[in-house]
Amino acid sequence: MGSLFRSEKVTLCQLFLQSEAAYNCVSELGEIGLVQFRDLNPDVNAFQRKFVNEVRRCDEMERKLRFLEKEIKKDEIPMLDTGDNPEAPQPREMIDLEATFEKLENEMKEVNANAEALKRNFLELTELKHILRKTQVFFEEEERNVVADAQLALHADEAPVLASQPLQLGFVAGVILRERIPAFERMLWRACRGNVFLRRAEIEIPLEDPVTGDQVNKSVFIIFFQGEQLKQRVKKICEGFRATLYPCPETQAERREMAIGVMTRIEDLNTVLSQTQDHRHRVLVAAAKNIKVWFNKVRKIKAIYHTLNMFNLDVTQKCLISECWCPVDDLDRIQAALRRGTERSGSSVPSILNRMTTKQEPPTYNKTNKLTGAFQGLIDAYGVATYREVNPAPFAIITFPFLFAIMFGDTGHGIIMFLFGLWMVVKEKSLGASKSDNEIWNTFFGGRYLIMMMGLFSIYTGLIYNDIFSKSMNIFGSSWNADIAYPGDMGNNVEKLMLAKTYRLNPNSTNWSKEPYPFGMDPAWQFATNKLMYVNSFKMKMSVTIGVMQMMFGVILSLFNHVHFGNYLNIYAEFIPQIIFLAFIFLYLVVIIIAKWIYFDPITMNTNCAPALLIGFINMFMFNYPNKDASPTPPCSSLTWYDGQQVIQTLLVVCALICAPWMLLVKPIILRQRSRQVKTAISVNSGDIRNQISENVEVVHHDETVLIVDEEVEKFEFGDIFIHQVIHTIEYCLGCISNTASYLRLWALSLAHAELSEVLWNMVFRIGLGIDGWLGAIMVPVVFAPWACLTIAILLLMEGLSAFLHTLRLHWVEFDNKFYSGSGYLFTPFSFDDIMDVPSGLGDD
Amino acid sequence: MNSVNFNINFGYLEGLCRGFKGGILKQTDYINLVQCEILEDLKLHLQSTDYGSFLANEPSPLSVSVIDDKLKEKLVIEFQHMRIHSVEPLSTFLDFITYGYMIDNIILLITGTLHQRDIRELIPKCHPLGSFEQMEAIHIANTPAELYNAVLVDTPLAPYFMDCISEQDLDEMNIEIIRNTLYKAYLEDFYKFCSTIGGSTTEVMCEALAVSLLTYMSDSLKYVCIFCIVQFEADRRAFIITINSFGTELTKDDRAKLYPRCGKLHPDGLAKLAQADEYEQVKVVADYYGEYKPLFDGAGTGPGEKTLEDRFFEKEVKIMMSAFMQQFHFGVFYAYLKLKEQECRNIIWISECVAQKHKAKIDSYIPIF
C-alpha cells in the first residue's frame, strides 16, 4: 500500500540556479513534474516582474498562432496532432520561432489581403452581372410600357410631351443588402417626396462578403428619377445605406456588350482567384502540420518564464533563488533533472538544491495511478488529507464498490454495469484520445474503473441475494421441502412450490434437507409470501454488522494517526474510550446478532424463544431484566438466554457510560496541567526575584499569573479546549448511535432496488409473458423494449446514482469522521503535462 | 410590478447585471494600472481582471484607440445580451437607455457633415449602442425639417424632435439647441416612463382596493431610485446648459426652454437658473440644494482643483453605486451602464497618460469603489 496509505514525504527546498542555467533547469523540472514552486514575490505586479518581456513575447507568438489556427479552421484543413511532446526550445530558438511565425503571419495577411481584393473585385463583377441581367427585365417591361404609352399617345393631344418623357428620366442601378430594403425604400420615398420610381429584384444565389467571408443575400434595385438634384439626393441615400451603384448603359446593345465583357472578366478573375486560394491552401497545409507542436513549444516557454517570475534574484544578480516543495523520494530524480539542465545550458557551476526546515505544513501528495486516481478523487472532494495523515482512499477501493453493491445487489444489473465499465476500460486509449466536451460523459469516463468495480461487486451481492432482474436462480437445488400435500410426484421441490403459487415458508418447519443452500439465498424464498419479512430481517442485521465493522475500523485507523504524529495523549484520552464505547455497545449488538443466527435453529431450540434484539437492547440500557417467575409471565424472547448475561451486560453498559466523561475530561485536564508545569519551569528560570514574586502571586492571584505566563509561552485557553472537547465527545457518542442508524440506508436502498425491479418485471414484462399463443410471441418482444429501457433508465442510472451518492455519504460522513481531518492542501507540481491539456482556441468563441 | 413577481421576469437579468457589476475594477486595480510604463503593461494587468483576454488577439504595439474600441465592444456585448434576454417593460427601459446614445450620434453626424467631413470617417466614431439603420443617410438633410421627415421619422426619437422642426437651418448654434431640446424631451419622456412602470403595477393591484394604497407606496419607494438617477441627469444638464450658454448669443428665454422639466431643480431652481448671467449666479442657485452645493464648492480649473464636470461624474458614480443598494428595480441596469462607461473613461484616461508618458495627471481618474 505504501505511498497510498500516507501521502508522500514532502520537503521544502531552496534552489540556487545560475542565471544562464535557470531556464534549462526549470524546463527539465517541468518535464518531470515533481516540484511545486512557491511564489516569492507575491506583492509584485504581473507587469513588473523580471521576465515580463519574455512572457509578453510568448503572448504575441500565441496570438499569431491563434490567428493561423483560425485561418486553418476556416479552410477546414485537418490539424496534425502527432501527440509527440517536443522539449521546450532554448531561449535562443525563441527568436527563430518568432521569425517563423512573423513570416507566416505576414504571408497569411498578404494572401488574405490579396484574396480580399480579388474577392471584392469578383463580388463587384458578379453584382454587375446580376444588375445587367435583372435590369434587362425592367427595361423590357419599360419598353413595352413605352410602346403602350406611345400607342395611347397617338390618340391623345399631349402625345409629344408624353412620348418624350421617358427619355428625360435618369436612373441608377445598384445592389443592396436584402434586409435593408424596406427602410431604404421608405427613406427614398420620404426624402424625394415620392418622385422616384424603384424597381427591385432579388439575387437568388447568396454572395460572399469579402471581409468576413459570410454568405449574404442581396437585391438588385434600379431607381428612376427626373433631374440632377434628385440624382444627387438618391446617390447620397444609396451611399447612406451602403448600396453599391454600378454604371448601367442605357441601350440594350451596350448592355449586352457590357455583359459579355463582364463575363470574360469574371472568368479571368476566377482563375486568378483559384490560384490565390491554392497558394493560401498550400501555406496553411504546411502550417497545419506543425501548429500543434508550435503551440506546445510556445506554451512551454511561457510556462517556464512564468515560473522564473516567481524566483528571487540574489544580491550578486548571478543566480536565481527559488523555494519549492519536493517529494523526498524523488529528490534524486530532481537532482538528476537539475544536472541535465545545467549540462544542457553548458554552465560549469552546478545548480544547488538545499533542503530546508520549515514550520509550514507541506502539501499533500498522493501518487496515484489510473485505478486509484478515481478513488483518491472521491476522497479529495471531501477534503484533501492533512500532510502524512492516514488516507482513506486505499480502503475505499474495496469498501466503496462493496457498500455500493449492497444497495445495488442485482446480478443482472451488475453485469450490465460491469460490461459498460469494462468497455470503457478496454477502449480507454481511443476514447480518451477523442477529447469530448460532454461533461456527463467525462464524469462517467473518469470513473470507469470505479464503475467496473461497482458492477463486479454488484454481481457478487446479486448472487448472495439471488437476484437477477428480480428473479432467482435455482443453481444448487432448493433445500426446502414443500410440506404441502400435492398429488403425484412433481419432482423438484421448487416446481411444486411454483405450482402452489403462494406459499408461506415457516422458519420453524423442520421440513428441509438439513443442508443449507450452499451459496446465497435459497431460491424457494422467491415464492414465499413471507419473503419480504425474511429479507428485511436479514438485510437489516447485515447493514448494522457491516456498519459497525467499518466504524470500528475507522476508529482503529485513528490509532495509526495518533501513533504517527506521536500524540500519545490522544491514545489514552480519546482512542481507548472511543473504542470501548463503540465495542461494548455496538460490537456487542453485532455479536448477539451473529449468536442468534448460529444458536437458534428449529431443530435444537424453540425459535419462539430466540431473543428479541431490540427489546433486549433497550432492556440492557434500562438495566431491566424480566423475571421468569413474574406474573404476568413475560414472553420468553425477552428473557436472558445465556448464563451471566445480566452481569456481563450491566458491566458493558457501565463501562461504556464511563467512557463519556473519560473522553470529556481527561484531555483538557492533562493539557492544563502540562501548561502549568511549563509555566513553573519558566518562572524558575527567570531568576530569584521573579521567582519569589511569582510564587507569592501564585498563591494570591492564581488566575492572573496563569494569564501572564500563557502570553509568554503559548496561548493556552482552557475554556476553548474544554468546549472543543465537549463538542467532540457529544459528536462522537451521539454519532455512534446515529451513524449506526445511518448504515441502515444499506438495507433501505437495497430493498428499494429489489422492489423496484420486481415491480418493473411484474407490471411490464410479465404482461408479455402472460399471454398465450402467437399473440404472446409478438407481445414479448414488444413488451421487452419498454422493460429494457426502464431498466436502464430507472434501475441502472437513477438507482445507481442514488446508491452511489449514499455510498459516498457513508464514506465521507460515517467512516471518515472517525479519523480523517482532511485539512491539508494539494500538491500542485509545475508540470508541462497540465499545460498541454488546455484547449487551444482562446479566441475561437 | 412588485417584489414578489419581479424575479419571474427580471430576476435572471438583475442577477446577471449584479454579476457584471462585480467585475468592475477595484481601487487596487487602479493602483496597479497607474504604475504601468507602457500600454502592454496595462494589457497584462487587465488580463488578470474580469476583462480577461479581451486584448489577446490584438497585435502589438497597442494603441489607445484599439483599447477604446475593445472596451466599448465588451460593454456593448454585455448590454446587448441583457437587451436580447429582456421582456417588457425592461426591454423598453433598456431601449430608452440607448436613445441617449442615438441623440449623441445624430448630433455628431450632423456636426461632422456641417464641417464637410466624410460620413464614412464619422460612422466609426459613433457609439455602437446608439446606431440605427437610417443613421448613415443623415447627411442628405440640410434643414431640421428635412432631418425629421427623411431620417428621424422612423426612429423612436421622432416625438422628441417635434420642437426642433421650426428651426431654420443647421448651424452650430442650432445643432446645440437641437441637441439640448432632444435631450430635454428624452429625459422627460424617460422620467414619465419610469413613473409608469411603478404605476402599472398599481393599476393591476387596484382591484384589491385595500391593498392598492400600500402597493403604490412601496412601489413609489422602489422607483425613487430610478427617479433619483434620471433627476440627477436632468439637473446636471440644466447646470451645464446654463454655464455653457454664457458668452453665446443664446437668449435667456431660449435657454429656459431647454431645461428638462423634471428633477429636483424643477420648478424653482430652473426659474432662477434661467435668470443667471454668470457662473457665480449659478453657484448661488446650486447653494439652495444640499446635494449640489458641494459640487460647486471648490470646483475650478486651477491646478489641484477638480473641474465641475469631474465633480458631476463623481456624484454620478456615487448615485449609481447607491442604485445597487436596492433590489427589484431597473435602476441597476442603467447604473451598471453608467458605471461601466465611467470605468472605460478611466481606463482610457490612464492609457492616454501612459501612452503620452504624461504621468502628472494620471491620478485624476474617478474611482468607482
Image (cartoon, coloured by chain):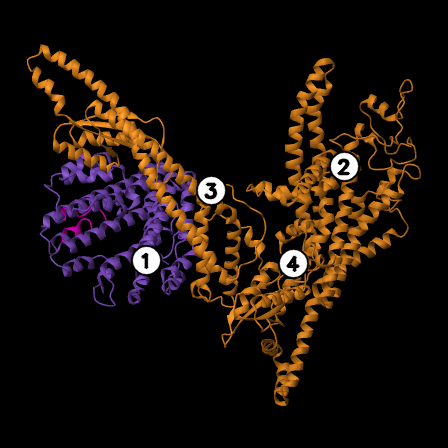
Chain colours: A orange, B purple
Camera-side residue: A641 or B345?
Answer: B345
Left or right: A502 as drawn, with respect to B318: right
Q: Are marks 2 and 4 on the same chain?
A: yes
Is A20 on the left or on the right of A640, as rendered?
left
Mark 1 Cα-neighbour bin, 10 Å: few <14, some 14–19, many ≥20? many
- The amino acid type of the residue labelled 3 equals Lys
Whether callout 4 and callout 3 share a subunit is answered yes
Q: Are marks 2 and 3 on the same chain?
A: yes
Residue receiving disc 3: A73
Quickly name the residue at label 2. A462
Closer mark to the observer between disc 4 and disc 3? 3
Q: CA distance from mark 3 to mark 1?
A: 37 Å
Disc 4 is placed on an element classified as loop
Which residue bears the numbered disc 4?
Answer: A385
Give the label on residue B346, or none: 1
Looking at the image, residue B131 lies above or below residue A97: above
Mark sitting earlier along the chain (2/3): 3
Q: Chain of mark 3?
A: A
